[in-house]
Each structure stands twice: as C-alpha cells, then as structure tokens.
C-alpha cells in the first residue's frame, strides 16, 4: 500500500489513472497505474553469482518470446545444474562429508504455487523435480529417497553427480575433516533466479548442492520457501545465497518481500534483511566475518536491488539493456 501511495504521489498520469479506476479493486489499480505510466521494466531476470550470466541468457530466450517467468527461471537454472564445472550446483556439485552429492531446490510461480526437493541424490535437475512436485503432487516438498523415487517416476535418470575433481578434493578434505564453511571461499554458492515476464508476472527458482562437506542430511535455505526464495505476484520476489542457516534464521526472502510490501525499494529491503542478520549475529555472539549472505530482489515495477554481508557477491541482470554482472553493495567494510 505504501508503495502504491508513493508512486501515486510522484506521477501526475498515475493520479488520472487512479481516478479512472476508482471502482476497481486495488490490485487492478496497481497494474493499470504502472502500465499507463510506462514505468514497468519488463521483462527482466536476475540471478546470483557469475554463473547467472549464461543462466540469464537461457532465461531471456524464454522471456523475449513473451514466455512465462516460471518457464524462464526453470530453463535458466538448468544451465547451471548441468554444468560440471560449477561446483556448487547440480552435476559437479561438491559432496557432503560422506562423499554424497545431495541437492536442494525450490520453485515458486505467480499463483503462489510452490514445489521443493531437499537432500535429493543422483538427479541432475532438481529444479525440474521441484516443479513436478508443485504441479503433479498434492504436496509442496519431498526429501531424500522419496524425492529420488518421485524423480524416477517422472522420467529422470539416475546419474553419478560426483565428478572426478570433486571426489579428489573430498578425499583430500577427509585427511583433516576440518569443517569450516568460509565466506566467499568457493565451497558453496547457489543459483537463485527471479524474473518478471512480459505479462507482468513474477516467478523464482533456487538450486544448490549446499555447503561442501556438510553433515549428511543437512538442508540449507535453498529449498525452503520463504528462506532461499519467495515470490508474491502483487509485490515482488527475492532469492538468497550464502550461509543457509543464517537465511533460515530470519526467514530471509519472505522478509525481503514483506519489506517491499511495506513500501521499501528492493535495495532497501535487501539491506534491512542483511541488517537483521548482522544484529542477530551480534546477539548470538558470533563473528560476522565468518558469515556471508546475499539477497537479490525484484519488485512488480521491474526495479531491483541486492545487498550482502561482505564484499565479493555479485549477480547477473538481464533486461532490455543487456546481460550484466553487477557487484552487490555490502555491509562489512574491513
Ligand atoms: N545457501 C546455500 C546453502 O546454505 C549455499 C550458498 O548459497 O552458498 O545450502
């Protein structure tokens, strides 16, 4: 509502549109006001990290043909999932401490349909399994063996996801078995992707192999709707990367979307969510230097924002101006 009010204040055309729409419901007003003023930047797709560049390319192919944001985000993150050189997502992802590659993913569409898989093994495209959970089951989340069996029933093949390099590194790690997920060290990362399509609809997808050498069975934020991803088609969408435990603690992406609902820009919403993590880290007497979390967010007008705990996080944005990698602003200046 505050969003709508600010917007109305700043555009004369918008006021006329609101008058014309006096009898329509509020959602209709927002849609109409935005399109009359020409302010909506669409389509647009955002995704985390530099692997977002090729992922965005694939998503853009869908978006530019007026495709659905849901199809765009699934198509986009599948590129990263299939790439064995990306060692923190899908095929090629680093294993847990038992040498098992376990994958987490979730997806959310413009109708608030949701689907998710956690601790899924041997399947190259967890995001498509998450989508099948959303579209073909009465549930929203499947884990472990149940998720695997469901994937097989949907035609996915059982594959070995542990590539040679990952296996070698894991065997090296076993010599010390020292577990310290570090900020900005390449032992984790997630592709989270959010998009606004030509029709003005939002969707998001999020997929990862999680933290390298995690305990078997550990699940991060990435398959948790509201933590690693959240979409509200009236307001905006957000996705996260970094230490999942910290994102879950604040229900991160739901928080970012709710802050946008209160009238915050995507940038301010991401900043406030990061500040929540900063505060809780202090309260819990932990060291912020050991923590990295990054959020990206997109609102209904196609405005975007990003913020993270410490430097080093970047994201890819593809809109009519092209596909660009952008360094996110950050809190901890050392
Ligand atoms: N958020 C992921 C997890 O905690 C990892 C990452 O994005 O770095 O599993």
Image (tube, rainbow, N blue to C red):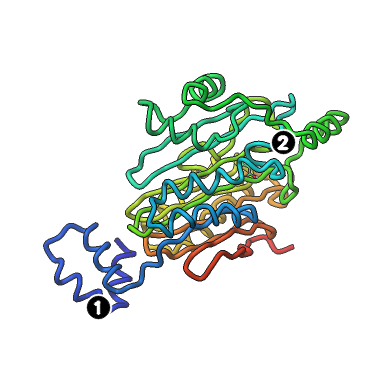
Q: Nearer the viewer, residue 301 or 295?
A: 301
Q: Residue at x 47, y 26 (%)?
A: 154
- Quadrant where the C terminus lies? bottom right
Judged left or right of residue 32, residue 331 is: right
On the picture, is 85 further left or further right than 329? Answer: right
State the residue at coordinates (45%, 53%).
62
Whereabouts is ligand 1, in terms of quadrant?
Answer: top right
Secondary element under disc 1, as helix, strand or loop, is helix
- The CA distance from mark 2 to mark 1 is 53 Å
Q: Are marks 2 and 1 in contact (CB under 8 Å)?
A: no
Residue shown at 52% from the left, 54% from the top: 273
Q: Which mark is residue 94?
A: 2
* Circle nearer the N terminus (2, 1): 1
Disc 2 CB within 8 Å of nearest ligand 1 atom: no
70 to the left or right of 121: left
Q: What is the number of callouts on the image?
A: 2
Q: Which residue is mark 1?
A: 13
* Quadrant holding the N terminus: bottom left
Secondary structure type for disc 2: loop
Q: Is residue 19 above or below residue 260?
A: below
Examine the image and state in which quarter residue 98 appears. Answer: top right
Residue 208 image point, x, y percent: 60, 40
Residue at disc 1, CB closer than 8 Å to ligand 1: no
Quarter assignment of residue 170: top right
Q: Residue furthest left?
A: 23
- Neighbor class of circle 1 (other Cα within 10 Å; few <14, some 14-19, many 20+) is some
What residue is drawn where x is 22% and y is 59%?
A: 28
Percent x, y of residue 277: 58, 50
> Where residue 54 appears, x then y in whole percent?
60, 54
Say which of 273 and 39 sits in front.
39
| Residue 329 showing in the rendered view | no
């Amino acid at each position: 509502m505050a969003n709508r009010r600010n917007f109305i204040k700043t555009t004369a055309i918008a006021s006329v549109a609101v008058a014309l729409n006096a009898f329509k419901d509020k959602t209709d007003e927002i849609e109409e006001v935005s399109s009359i003023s020409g302010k909506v930047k669409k389509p647009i797709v955002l995704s985390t990290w530099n692997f977002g560049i090729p992922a965005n390319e694939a998503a853009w192919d869908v978006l530019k043909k007026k495709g659905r944001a849901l199809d765009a985000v699934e198509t986009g993150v599948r590129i990263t999932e299939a790439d064995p050189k990306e060692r923190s997502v899908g095929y090629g992802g680093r294993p847990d401490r038992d040498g098992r590659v376990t994958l987490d993913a979730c997806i959310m569409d413009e109708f608030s349909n949701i689907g998710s898989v956690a601790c899924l093994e041997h399947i190259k495209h967890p995001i498509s399994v998450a989508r099948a959970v959303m579209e073909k089951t009465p549930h929203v989340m499947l884990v472990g063996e149940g998720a695997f069996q469901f994937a097989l029933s949907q035609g996915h093949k059982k594959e070995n996801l542990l590539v040679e390099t990952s296996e070698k590194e894991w065997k090296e790690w076993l010599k010390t078995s020292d577990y310290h997920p570090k900020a900005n060290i390449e032992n984790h990362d997630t592709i989270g992707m959010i998009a606004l399509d030509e029709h003005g609809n939002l969707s998001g997808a999020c997929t990862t192999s999680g933290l390298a050498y995690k305990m078997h069975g550990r699940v991060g934020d990435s398959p948790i709707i509201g933590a690693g991803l959240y979409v509200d088609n009236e307001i905006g969408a957000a996705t996260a990367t970094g230490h999942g435990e910290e994102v879950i603690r604040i229900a991160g992406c739901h928080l970012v979307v709710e802050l946008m609902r209160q009238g915050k820009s995507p940038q301010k919403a991401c900043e406030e969510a990061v500040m929540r993590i900063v505060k809780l880290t202090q309260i819990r007497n932990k060291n912020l230097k050991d923590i990295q979390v990054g959020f990206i967010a997109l609102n209904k007008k196609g405005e975007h924002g990003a913020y993270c705990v410490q430097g080093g996080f970047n994201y890819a944005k593809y809109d009519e101006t092209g596909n660009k990698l952008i360094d996110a602003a950050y809190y901890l200046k050392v």
